[in-house]
Amino acid sequence: MGMVTILLFVFCVVCTVTDFRRGKVYNALTFPSMLVGLMAHIVIGGFQGATFSLLGMGAALILFFPFFALKIMGAGDVKMLMAIGALKGAAFALNVAILSIFVGGMISFFILLYKGRLLQTITSIGKLLRSIIVSELEYEPIPLERCMMAPFAISITVAVFLTQFNVLDVSWLWIY
């Protein structure tokens, strides 16, 4: 296991702890990790290394910025994925991004089940889908203060470990 991978694991675990405890992934973690990833790849591969790292950051930004813009995820989560892209490249970052969505969905399912809000959430999703299909129906979203939030860094970190150890490869979703 290389130094970049060890740095990635430490970075992800620290981000997960801060996100779980304080609800934030700090810039003091993400920006230096992006810079270290970029510098490491420049040292290792020169211009190609820089391209590898920058494409990784760009892929994560392009994929997850819309989720931030729609207030589905925080900016720290997007920057965390950008740092992962800087450290491990675009293919790794895309695999992590896709897996983190699935892992996040599974975590959310169990949280909703545990909190007794699964049926309410399914009903709300059904109303939303019906209002999209039938334009005359109005959808009343749940107020943000009543929404349950889960730290997404946990999902990202689980996805990093699944990807690094080739437990689950979802690259077939975006390669072909």
Image: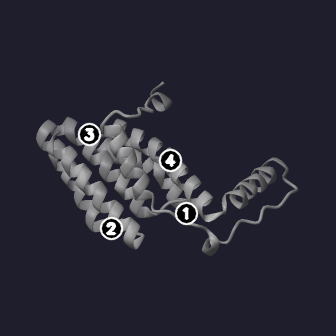
Q: Residues within 10 Å of mark 2 (few under 14, many from 20)?
A: some
Left or right of 148: which side holds 84? left
Amino acid type of disc 1? Lys
Mark on residue 71? Answer: 1
Q: Nearer the viewer, residue 109 or 71?
A: 109
Mark on residue 51? Answer: 3
Q: Position of residue 92 (x, y in %)?
A: 34, 38
Give how far apart the Cα atoms at labels 3 and 1 are: 30 Å
Q: Position of residue 86 (x, y in %)?
A: 28, 47
Mark on residue 26? Answer: 2
Q: Residues within 10 Å of mark 4 (few under 14, many from 20)?
A: some
Task: Tell me the SS state at disc 4.
Answer: helix
Looking at the image, what colour scheme do you see?
one colour
Q: State which mark lies toward you, 2 or 3.
A: 2
Q: Residue at x 17, y 39 (%)?
A: 1
Left or right of 151: which side holds 57? left
As displayed, is residue 169 above or below residue 33?
Answer: above
Amino acid type of disc 3? Thr
Q: Position of residue 111 (x, y in %)?
A: 56, 59
Amino acid type of disc 2? Tyr
